[in-house]
Image: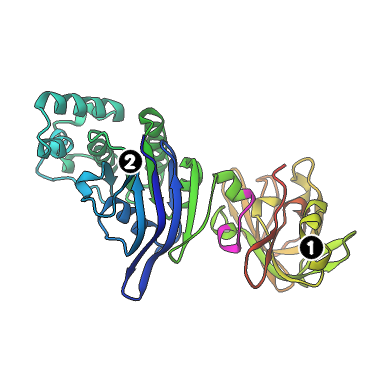
Amino acid sequence: MSGVSYKNMTKAWGDVIGVNNLNLEVPDKEFLVLVGPSGCGKSTALRCLAGLEEITQGEIIIGDRVVNDVPPKDRDIAMVFQSYALYPHMTVYDNMAFGLKLRKTPKTEIDKRVQEAARLLGITPLLDRKPKQMSGGQRQRVALGRAIVRDPAVFLLDEPLSNLDAKLRVQTRAEISKLHQRLETTFIYVTHDQVEALTMADRIAVMKDGVLQQVDSPQNLYDHPDNVFVAGFIGSPSMNFFSGTITGTTDEMYVDSGSVRLRVSQSEVEQLGRDSIGKEVIFGVRPEDIHHPQYQPAGVTEQLLESTVDVTELMGNEIFVYLQTGEQNYIARVDPRADLRPGDKVQMAFNIEKIHIFDRTTEKSLATPSSN
């Protein structure tokens, strides 16, 4: 049983702080994804856990053991990198067996583990090939196999799908999720791709500038982001944001940017309270909560907003529509049956039950919609 804990962990290089006072608990067998833009500290946090970087302060615990001073080879972890890091002169079998040979594992045990990992990953026919004879997806499976044969307490995966094409990324992320279910081992996975994070994780840890922003389940991050950064990072296309003011009364409260004025739902009025009237805020609406009125889902509490179509992007199962109202630009995801063309005037239906409201100064959430 091996969970992972970061306790007040900081990694700095002189005045440059890579990870700042990270506190994070990863229970045994969880699939945790560290996500954020380039330079946010996610890979540094993983490298510190692996022992490839020495931490500046704090503690890292694997299971019940503090591993600050434990060499990487003794931490009972296995790491899969963005680059497959396979030995080009070795066969697949030898690549997978190499680490076990260094540890003087008996040959029969090596063969058993390699064959089992190859069967699990569907690469048994490739065991006699060399890396140059395989596709990128096959090489990535070999890299995973090399980690699996170690039978580690914790798997660390650092952007392992970045070198794969789009179709293969979708296929391989499903394979990694199934692998986690079969192995029942702790996985910590780093990516900048929030779609990977949403589809694979038990929980997601969002990082920015070395600081942990929020940790939660994918759905809760989507429904209840703690701040503007998380709200904008989770979801594709990104949430639309408008700077405005809270106006009206507690009986009829609005968020008003001038060009965009939307009524606040009763549940959010209760979160905001009477004292919020006049407060400067940022309010956000996800593109999927803005509809063509002719094709909106049942049960939407709508408010129509006249807008002009700038650009449309047909995606097959949906249309991304870029619109303008006054000085404000925003994007909507609408039903593919909507017949919209650049220059069209259209009344777009905003679901007012799905407005997110943030303090303009702190950018922290003041009110989030219910999940219903």
Amino acid type of the residue that numbered disc 2 sits on in the rendered structure? Val
Could you give the CA–CA distance between mark 1 and mark 2, rounded to whole angstroms?
53 Å
Q: How far across and down, in percent of the image, does residue 105 sit?
A: 12, 31
Toward the viewer: 371 or 333?
Answer: 371
Q: Quadrant of residue 232?
A: bottom right
Task: Where is residue 203? Give x, y as percent.
Answer: 50, 44
Name the residue located 73 percent from the left edge and 61 percent from the top edge: 344
Q: Residue at x 74, y 42 (%)?
A: 297
Q: Is residue 151 magenta?
A: no
Label 1 sits on what residue type? Glu
Q: Nearer the viewer, residue 320 or 262?
A: 262
Q: What x and y, as percent, mark residue 361?
A: 64, 73
User: On the image, numbered disc 2 is attached to which residue?
Assistant: 154
Q: What is the secondary structure assignment of the residue under circle 1?
A: strand
Residue for point 45% across, 55% down: 23
Mark 1 and mark 2 lie on one chain; the one further toward the N terminus is 2
Looking at the rendering, the stretch of residues picked out in magenta corresponds to 223-230
Contact check, label 1 and label 2, Cβ < 8 Å: no
The residue nearer to you, when weighing 324 against 41, is 41
Would residue 172 be seen by someone viewing this image from the given angle? no
Q: Can see residue 279? A: yes
How packed mark 2 is, by other alpha carbons closer than 10 Å (few <14, some 14-19, many 20 or more), is many
What's the coloring here? rainbow
Q: Is residue 157 left or right of residue 205?
A: left
In the picture, the quarter occupied by the C terminus is top right
| Image coordinates for residue 63, horizontal then vertical, percent | 35, 41
Depicted 1 relative to depicted 279: above or below: above
* Residue 306, label in figure: 1
Badge 1: residue crowd in 10 Å (few <14, some 14–19, many ≥20): some
Residue 17 falls left or right of residue 211: left
Circle 2 SS class: strand
Is 282 in front, or is 76?
A: 76
